[in-house]
Image (cartoon, rainbow, N blue to C red):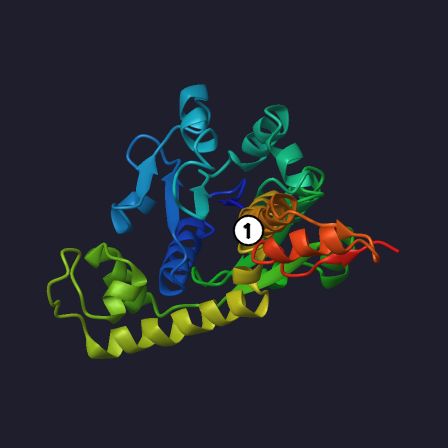
Amino acid sequence: MARPAVILLGADKGGVGKTTVSRTLLDYFADRKISTRAFDTEWPKGTLKRFHPEITDVVDVTSVPDQMKIFDTIETSGTQVTLIDVRAGLMSPTLRALRDIGFLDMTKWNQVTFAVFHILGPSIASLDEIAETSKLLVDARYFLVKNFINDTSFFDWDQDTYNSYFNRIPHAVEITVPKLSEMACEQVELASVPFASFIGNKKRNGELAVNSFVLRGYVRHWLQKVWAEYDRVKLCDVISKADPAATAAAAAREIAPAAAASRDAAFAALSATAATPRIFVAKDDAGTRDAAARLQRQEPRVAESS
């Protein structure tokens, strides 16, 4: 039985393709039959909700009532994964809020699985974000995402400088999202459907669309590469990690009926033994032997005293 998982996607800089990565994750989990709900913090309009309206709510992550809407329902939502697409500039404040309310402690105590997808930009400021964010994520799964979909060039970083930041975070894992054809990206945006629906040539209502065969092919190839990255880092294993308490409780529920049956059988045997008369006969007492013979039907075996 998997414990609840929370995935937070964010960046302290805008324009790095954060919502695009969120959309690939929602398609990935849907394909793997992993139940997921999403929260779009681009309050009040939302961006993610336009592509996945059935499972996405728009919230103000800086609002306490909306924080309650997200985190008070993690265990009761009926979904395995809660995905939070954090508005640009709010990732660090959101992580500090999670620390203050004790959510990060839940991660430390293995009550919830917590993973952060930090979408990086090409500037040195993104490296500073890594240093700031990693301080709060000692017990979380930390993924550093290089998103090339916006034709971003990460060669602005000096490799030695980048390594000096990256090596400070031994639990961080790097993910690369390749570039998608600009025309294909624009057509998916115009269609306002998940990537998987565009590939399947479906409209939002499930009816047949008239999407370009060529563009669908480009999107399919690109999405397969993105999903291959998620498989490489064993994302499904990360979010499907078993809940020790729930597993123990389930095992106890399975063992209890068998234990009860064994106990009842033992008591039944004891009761039968107690209810059966036992007759002790002296070796040389012929009268008692005659009496014992008359009771033989109740006592299959007559015990003799020495």
> Residue 46 at x, y = what percent?
31, 38
Residue 12 lies left or right of residue 157; in this view the side is left
Q: Quadrant of residue 159?
A: bottom right
- Looking at the rendered structure, the secondary structure element under dot 1 is helix
* Residue extending farthest right: 306
Instruction: From the top left corner, tell me how far across and down residue 40 is, in percent.
Output: 37, 39
- Seen as rendered, the residue at the extreme top is 64
Q: Where is residue 44 shown, x and y percent of the image? A: 31, 30
- Amino acid tagged 1: Ala
Read off the residue under disc 1.
261
Q: Quadrant of residue 192?
A: bottom left
Query: In the picture, residue 24 is in which quadrant?
Result: bottom left
Category of crowding for the residue at label 1, using alpha-carbon neighbours closer than 10 angstroms: few (below 14), some (14–19), many (at least 20): few
Compared across the picture, whether 102 is left or right of 158 comes to left
Which image quarter holds the C terminus? bottom right
The residue sitting at 63% across, 40% down in the picture is 107
- Residue closest to the eye, 231 or 195: 231
72 w.r.t. 28: above or below: above
Is residue 121 something that shows in the picture? no
At horizontal 64% and vertical 49% (from top left) the residue drawn is 273
**Residue 71 appears in the picture as rendered:** yes
Lateral position of residue 122 relative to residue 184, left or right: right
Q: Residue at x 17, y 70 (%)?
A: 211
Reply above or below: 187 against 42.
below
